[in-house]
């Protein structure tokens, strides 16, 4: 055993990203390629234009990297690498790297670096993120679990077979024979190729056998005519909710008017975590705010489970927000049952994170009410005041606590006829005041939850039409989008902000997801896009060329990574019996998480800078 | 051709080389070595650590040798060497407890005469560096005498001496253990390593030497003469 394994070097590399991605054999080999150098504090390891022949790893001490303008880019602690960018650009340094403490550095020869990039895909993906490559590639290479996320699937992803159909001239016997030979529990009846009805096992039992009907009767006599259906492109979870709400077990799936298949409760349940379905069902059966509160009290657990099961934060946001919608629906029905039918049409809108379908916990409520322009204070005022108070109070009882900023339907200002709402937005857009805009920002993320869609559509169309054309308004919104900035990265147990200040915790909300949400809002408003969800906004913005494809994808990946980090952080706090918050202590991050968070921050900073330049924002 | 090292020592090396029988040690002595005014960053070194069965070179055996080259001011791990040596008699439990090498493992190792040429080749043209170099110097000299009939004569750099120098020439005696390798490393901000593997200890010594040599230099790197006495 004359093993010349350099144990200490190998083990050190194995404990740090990206070397933790390498198999043991490769690690042992690269440990033997290492050269070790000691540099004093202040020593310039590389400066722009220098030829770089090594990848550097901080073994002890610390270093920092600045761009040619002296702007701090990164502070590098034990186990962190630098020089990747230079190596990727033909071995010429782009930035300056300086030891900020007496440091021991590991140097990995360029040839070894190249070989690792060639032979070790995870390592190559890691490097790609430094050269405008995609963040998600590297994350997936490591996690490799995209398919775990069944919740983001579309309905047609879940279809296991084509449709079983019979024409409407068939008899019940023929229908039953078709079901037997195809081994299915329901058959869809078509008329001229279009869906006319559905017949299930249960119908045969209840409507044929129990009623002692002859099997020669036409199927049209016993089928459910014009059944509810769902589009093939719908999100599976939405289909699930529809089935839960109406207590149906078979849901025809349509594609441009043609029958594509049939979704059954079994397919859905087999493919989904059961608890969201269970919760949705329960919510629709609740008769009081107290019962609703009991049902949604399980949301934090559900979020935790979904995250563990590999659901993306996007799916989780969709599910949680949809459950909030369900609670709102239920409270509205209860309010109408108590107060009587509404005297005039209204539209109940969600604002903020619920509107964007990005809620990941029971958060503050943000909502408002558009009333029909026939509104008359004397005749209708009392009804809608009580109505809004009932729903807002119910949400509060459920844990969607009253909005501290009073952005709620029970606030008189935010419960107004359509024409007043139009005036609000006209003023916000045509005469933008920075402060007023900051406050009303939340109303630029709106979604109809209940009531008259036409009221919402009219307002929404106006907003999109006006904002798209108003450069000054957009510049103000863009400037708002610079309010919150991501940190530069981490240094030891600190968060490193622009200018080099240290903080003990990072605000994953305001310095993490909010800057991305703000950017997406500006892209959407500038291109007149109806999408409200940040992910959807970014995709639509790329489509409309308001942002580059790469930029949109990078932001989406960054949002997903930061959001997941936030979810995991909150799940951890819940597990420890603490009240979940957004404040992350960098000390608990793995080397992998640190690297990817830092890459995500870089993406956000880059696109913030691009937006600032596009709108000529001098302060940035 | 300028002979290296230091005046009369040069002559001595030449004399030794001439007297050596052809073989590893003769080859070793044939190679030129750097002069005293060479900046340390342009010289070559080999940090070396021996694990032995005891402290008496006349009685005890070398059981393992770790060596790490230092070239151009950097530790170069591709030249690292770790060799086990078959002892002439059983190691005994006490020594085994220290370096963790058991008799049956060592019984399968190569004898010193097979290992030594490789070690001499790795030392050729390089100044040996060791922590408390007395042990390495005595054992290697003794080994060469036994195998080649001549001693291994070369100046050693001793990281323990360098540390003592860095700590200043105060009259207060140094407390017990202050000059141990791990204590010196920790004082110089170097990471903690698991002790008593010859290669790890040689690496630990090499890194400590980088720090010490850097600290003993000013605007320009220290010259060999600054490090040798």
Image: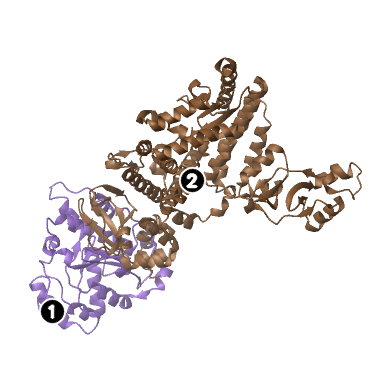
Chain colours: A brown, B purple
Bin the neighbour count of mark 1 within 10 Å (Cα to Cα): few under 14, some 14-19, many 20 and up. some
| Residue B187 vertical placement versus A49 (above, below) | above
Task: Kindly indicate the quadrant of the structure image that contains residue B36.
Answer: bottom left
**Which residue lies most toward the bottom here?**
B22
Q: CA distance from mark 2 to mark 1?
A: 78 Å
Whether residue A300 appears in this view of the structure is yes
* 2 vs 1, front mark: 2
Callout 1 secondary element: helix
Task: Kindly indicate the quadrant of the structure image that contains residue A37.
Answer: bottom left
- Which of these two is toward me, A76 or A217? A217
Checking the image for residue A168, the label placed there is none
Query: Percent x, y for residue A531?
Result: 50, 42
**Which residue corresponds to the image point at 36% horizontal and 29% vertical from the top-left?**
A433
Whether residue A5 appears in this view of the structure is no
Which residue is identified by label 2? A535
On the picture, is A279 further left or further right than A511? right
- Which of these two is toward me, A396 or A25? A396
Quadrant containing the N terminus of chain A is bottom left
On the picture, is A328 further left or further right than A163? left
Which residue is identified by label 1? B14
**Which residue corresponds to the image point at 33% horizontal and 59% vertical from the top-left?**
A84
Task: Kindly indicate the quadrant of the structure image that contains residue B159.
Answer: bottom left
Chain ID of residue with mark 2: A
**Which residue corresponds to the image point at 21% horizontal and 84% vertical from the top-left?**
B21
Query: Percent x, y for residue B195?
Result: 33, 57
Callout 2 secondary element: helix
- Which of these two is toward me, B24 or B69? B69
Do callouts 2 and 1 point to residues on the same chain?
no
Chain ID of residue with mark 1: B
Query: Percent x, y for residue A458?
Result: 53, 34
Quadrant containing the C terminus of chain A is top left
């Amino acid at each position: 055993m004359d093993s010349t394994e350099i144990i200490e070097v190998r083990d050190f590399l194995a404990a740090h990203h990206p070397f933790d991605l390498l198999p043991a054999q490769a690690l042992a080999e690269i440990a033997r390629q290492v050269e070790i150098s000691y540099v004093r504090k202040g020593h310039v390891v590389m400066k722009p234009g220098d030829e770089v022949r090594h990848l550097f790893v901080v073994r002890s001490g610390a270093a920092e990297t600045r761009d040619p303008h002296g702007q701090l880019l990164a502070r590098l602690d034990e186990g962190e690498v630098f020089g990747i960018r230079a190596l990727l650009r033909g071995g010429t340094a782009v930035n300056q790297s300086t030891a900020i403490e007496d440091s021991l550095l590991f140097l990995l020869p360029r040839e070894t670096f190249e070989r690792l990039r060639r032979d070790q895909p995870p390592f190559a993906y890691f490097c790609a993120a430094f050269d405008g490559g995609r963040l998600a590639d590297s994350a997936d290479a490591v996690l490799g679990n995209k398919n775990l996320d069944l919740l983001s699937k579309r309905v047609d992803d879940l279809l296991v077979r084509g449709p079983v159909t019979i024409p409407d001239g068939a008899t019940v016997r023929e229908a039953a024979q078709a079901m037997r030979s195809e081994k299915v529990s329901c058959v869809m009846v078509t008329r001229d190729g279009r869906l006319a009805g559905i017949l299930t096992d249960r119908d045969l039992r209840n409507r044929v056998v129990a009623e002692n009907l002859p099997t020669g009767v036409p199927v049209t006599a016993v089928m459910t005519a014009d059944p509810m259906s769902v589009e093939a492109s719908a999100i599976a979870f939405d289909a699930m909710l529809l089935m839960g709400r109406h207590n149906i077990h078979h849901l025809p799936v349509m594609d441009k008017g043609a029958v594509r298949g049939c979704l059954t409760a079994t397919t859905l349940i087999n493919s989904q975590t059961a608890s969201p379905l269970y919760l949705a069902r329960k919510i629709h059966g609740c008769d009081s705010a107290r019962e609703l509160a009991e049902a949604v009290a399980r949301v934090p657990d559900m979020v935790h489970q979904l995250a563990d099961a590999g659901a993306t934060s996007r799916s989780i946001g969709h599910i949680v927000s949809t459950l909030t919608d369900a609670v709102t629906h239920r409270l509205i029905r209860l309010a109408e049952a108590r107060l009587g039918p509404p005297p005039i049409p209204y539209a109940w809108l969600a604002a903020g994170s619920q509107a964007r379908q990005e809620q990941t916990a029971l958060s503050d409520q943000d909502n408002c009410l558009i009333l029909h322009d026939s509104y008359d204070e004397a005749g209708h005022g009392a009804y809608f005041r009580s109505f809004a108070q009932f729903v807002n109070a119910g949400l509060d009882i459920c844990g969607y606590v009253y909005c501290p900023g009073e952005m709620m339907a029970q606030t008189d200002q935010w419960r107004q006829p359509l024409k007043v709402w139009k005036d609000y937005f006209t003023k916000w857009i045509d005469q933008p005041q920075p402060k007023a805009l900051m406050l009303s920002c939340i109303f630029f993320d709106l979604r109809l939850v209940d009531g008259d869609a036409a009221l919402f559509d009219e307002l929404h169309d106006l907003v999109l039409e006006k904002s798209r054309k108003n450069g000054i308004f957009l510049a103000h919104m863009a400037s708002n989008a610079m309010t919150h900035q991501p940190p530069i990265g981490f240094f030891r147990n600190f968060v490193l902000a622009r200018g080099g200040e240290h903080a003990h915790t990072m605000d994953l909300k305001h310095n993490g997801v909010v800057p991305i949400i703000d950017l997406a809002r500006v892209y959407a408003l500038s291109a007149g896009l109806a999408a409200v969800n940040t992910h959807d906004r970014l995709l639509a913005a790329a489509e409309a060329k308001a942002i580059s494809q790469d930029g949109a994808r990078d932001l989406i990946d960054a949002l997903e990574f930061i959001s997941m980090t936030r979810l995991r952080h909150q799940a951890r706090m819940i597990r420890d019996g603490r009240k979940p918050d957004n404040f992350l202590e960098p000390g608990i991050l793995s080397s992998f998480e640190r690297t990817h968070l830092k890459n995500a921050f870089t993406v956000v900073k880059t696109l913030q800078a691009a937006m600032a330049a596009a709108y000529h924002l001098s302060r940035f | 051709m300028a002979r290296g090292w230091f005046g009369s020592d040069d002559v001595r090396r030449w004399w030794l080389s001439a007297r050596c029988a052809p073989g590893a040690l003769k080859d070793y002595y044939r190679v030129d070595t750097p002069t005293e005014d060479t900046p340390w960053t342009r010289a070559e070194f080999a940090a070396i650590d021996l694990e032995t069965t005891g402290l008496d070179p006349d009685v005890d055996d070398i059981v393992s040798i770790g060596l790490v080259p230092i070239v151009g001011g950097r530790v170069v791990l591709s030249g690292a060497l770790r060799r086990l040596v078959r002892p002439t008699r059983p190691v005994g439990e006490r020594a085994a407890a220290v370096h963790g090498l058991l008799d049956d493992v060592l019984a399968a190792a190569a004898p010193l005469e097979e290992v030594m040429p490789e070690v001499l080749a790795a030392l050729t043209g390089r100044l040996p560096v060791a922590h408390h170099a007395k042990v390495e110097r005595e054992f290697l000299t003794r080994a060469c005498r036994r195998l080649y009939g001549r001693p291994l004569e070369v100046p050693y750099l001793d990281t323990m001496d360098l540390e003592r120098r860095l700590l200043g020439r105060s009259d207060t005696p140094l407390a017990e253990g202050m000059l141990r390798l791990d204590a010196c490393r920790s004082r110089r901000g170097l990471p903690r390593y698991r002790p008593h593997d010859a290669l790890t200890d040689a690496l630990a010594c090499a890194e400590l030497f980088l720090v010490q040599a850097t600290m003993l230099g000013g605007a320009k790197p220290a010259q060999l003469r600054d490090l040798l006495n």
